[in-house]
Amino acid sequence: MNNFLDHQFQQQNPRFLSRLFYAQTASMVLAGSIAIITLGGWLFPSIGALLPADWWLMKQNAALCILISAIAIILIRKNSNILIIRLCGLIVIILSTASLYGHTTGQSLPIETFLTTDNYAKFSGRITVHGAVFFCLLGFSFIVAKTDQKHRNNIRDILTLLLIGMVLVIFSGYFFSATSLYGHSTETLVSFQTFFCMCLLTFANFVRGIQGGIFSLFLGLGIASYTARVTLPWTLIGPFAVISAINYFSTTQEIRIALSATLLSLIFFFIILWLANRISYLENDLRKLALTDEMTGLYNHRAFCILGKQSFLESLRNDSVLILLYFDLDGLKKINDSLGHQIGSEMIIEFADLLKANFRRYETIARVGGDEFVVLSKQNQTDAALDTALKRLADAVYAANSKSNKPYKISYSEGKITGRAKDFPSLDDLLTKADALMYENKRKKKLKY
């Protein structure tokens, strides 16, 4: 039963999901196409002559890693053989690890030039450290692909978070002209086209975790999913926008740092404020749903228990009088059987409206069962005042029954208990006594007629 409920309440937006999968496939086609064109430039000089001037900044091994990664993600999307996907991941890891080895030792490996020789840079075919780390992480995410084991899904999602971090670091380098964040020299750096493909691959890997992973939070229909989707762009783009604007208008470093800290604090303050207001609003809705009878708009049994216990404790403290009225509609089962449940529901709703119209707003009026209602008053009113209210209700019911366009007549039985809380062991005892008295009156009514 719990699994069924979890499934029902954790449903995802199918239209949004299909759009994400379409965007994932389109991203991989685009990244793969860029990689193929670049590889063509490396393998065939005539093609390279037609490409933009800096096309060679995407090294052949980087282009090959991008192409293999795009193929792997498409294979994962199509539920292809897991061994082929993991082989793709292994090739990407080998290619990127060879570049990391070269950066560490200063030695070149044959695998870096197995396609063609790079005459544009000091180390032929070598991927930057930034790109090599990125592709290593991406390759490992393919190794743990397509598994139902939760811990492996967690590893995949952690690797995706690291990929997002790498992309943000490189983006920061380009955005703020910090060359060391995206390259080593003018010949060995993460080119713009490589960075663009990294963004596409990161997005596609993000979509992989949209079902059954931590990123599924962004796809749900609930409160948390909506909140995450709204705040994500502000938290990612906001800091870059603020700092770039300050850099543009400010001259000294001290002013830039001070203004950046101030404005970033304000951004996060407003995000937290918005989240608090949104959560408060949704909490009120949830509270209303939890305590209100959907059909009649009255309090439900849960709300009556909460409010009734508060009134009971107040009566104990103040020695005030509690008055409990218990109502039960007569013949509802017969109406449901003969006229249908829709007609029976209409009668329940009409009687609830009559209760709301003829009792005071600060009295607790609740529907505690299918055709059972209670009115609890904690005021020190006399029986005469309550009898007046009951007479108003009886007159209102009579007037409603006089209408000829209804297939039913409202009839009800009531039970009334008056006393102080100290005279009863608990609120349940007070409710039980009122219920018993109501059924006794109902039995007498049947005998009379």
Image (spheres, grey):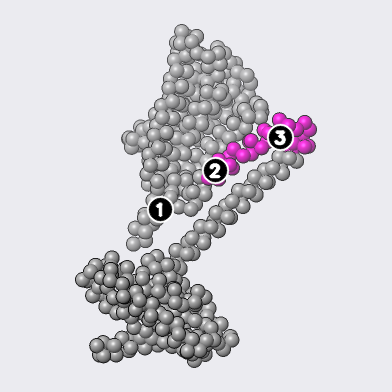
> Within 10 angstroms of label 1, few (less than 14), some, or many (20 or more) residues?
some
Q: Is residue 104 magenta?
A: no
Residue drawn 51% across and 30% down? Answer: 198
Q: Which residues fall within the magenta stretch?
A: 230-257
Magenta-drawn stretch, dominant element (helix, strand or loop): helix
Estimate the spatial distance between the alpha carbons at disc 3 and disc 1, rounded to whole Å.
42 Å
Query: Would residue 298 appear left or right of 97 to someone viewing this image?
Result: left
User: Crowding near pointer 2: few (<14 within 10 Å), some, many (20+)?
Assistant: few
Residue carrying label 3: 246
Q: Which of 81 and 200 is in front in this view?
A: 200
Q: Are marks 2 and 1 in contact (CB under 8 Å)?
A: no
Residue under circle 2? 232
Q: Distance between the residues labelled 2 and 3?
A: 22 Å
Q: Residue at x 49, y 86 (%)?
A: 385
Comes first in the chain, label 2 or label 3: 2
Seen from the viewer's position, the closer of residues 337 and 422 is 337
Q: Mark 1 = which residue?
A: 10
> For the image shown, how many numbered marks are present on the structure?
3
Per the image, label 2 sits on a secondary structure element best described as helix
- In space, the residues marked 2 and 1 are separated at their CA atoms by 20 Å
